[in-house]
Image (tube, rainbow, N blue to C red):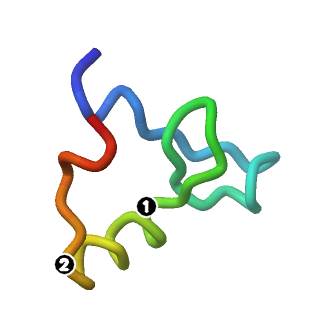
């Protein structure tokens, strides 16, 4: 699955914020972790 296919925005999930599909992890949260120095390897 290409990375962008994993991102959804549904008004019924967290008021329509973009989230990772089948989770409640918002892109805002993930970008915040990356800004703090976390690596993408944590999620692979």
Which residue is outermost to the bottom?
36
State left or right for residue 38 relative to residue 28.
left
Q: Distance between the residues labelled 2 and 1?
A: 15 Å
- Residue 29 in the image, given as x and y percentages of width and height: 47, 70
6 is higher (above) or lower (below) than 2: below
Badge 1 crowding class, 10 Å Cα cut-off, few under 14, some 14 to 19, many 20 or more, is some
Q: Quadrant of the C terminus?
A: top left
Label 2 Cα neighbours within 10 Å, binned few <14 / some 14-19 / many ≥20: few
All told, the count of numbered labels is: 2
Q: Tell me if 23 is positioned left or right of 12 in this view.
A: left
Residue 20 in the image: state x and y as whole percent: 49, 42
The residue that appears at 62% across and 30% down in the rendered structure is: 22
Q: Left or right: 23 with respect to 38?
A: right
Marks 2/1 in contact by CB < 8 Å: the verdict is: no
Residue at mark 1: 27
Report the disc number at residue 18: none
Which of the 4 image quarters holds residue 36?
bottom left
To which quarter of the image does residue 21 belong? top right
Q: Which of 29 and 11 is in front in this view?
A: 29
Which residue is denoted by mark 2 in the rendering?
Answer: 37
């Amino acid at each position: 699955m290409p990375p962008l296919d994993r991102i959804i925005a549904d008004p019924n999930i967290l008021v329509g914020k973009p989230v990772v599909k089948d989770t409640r992890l918002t892109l805002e949260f993930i970008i915040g972790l990356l800004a703090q120095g976390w690596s993408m390897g944590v999620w692979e």
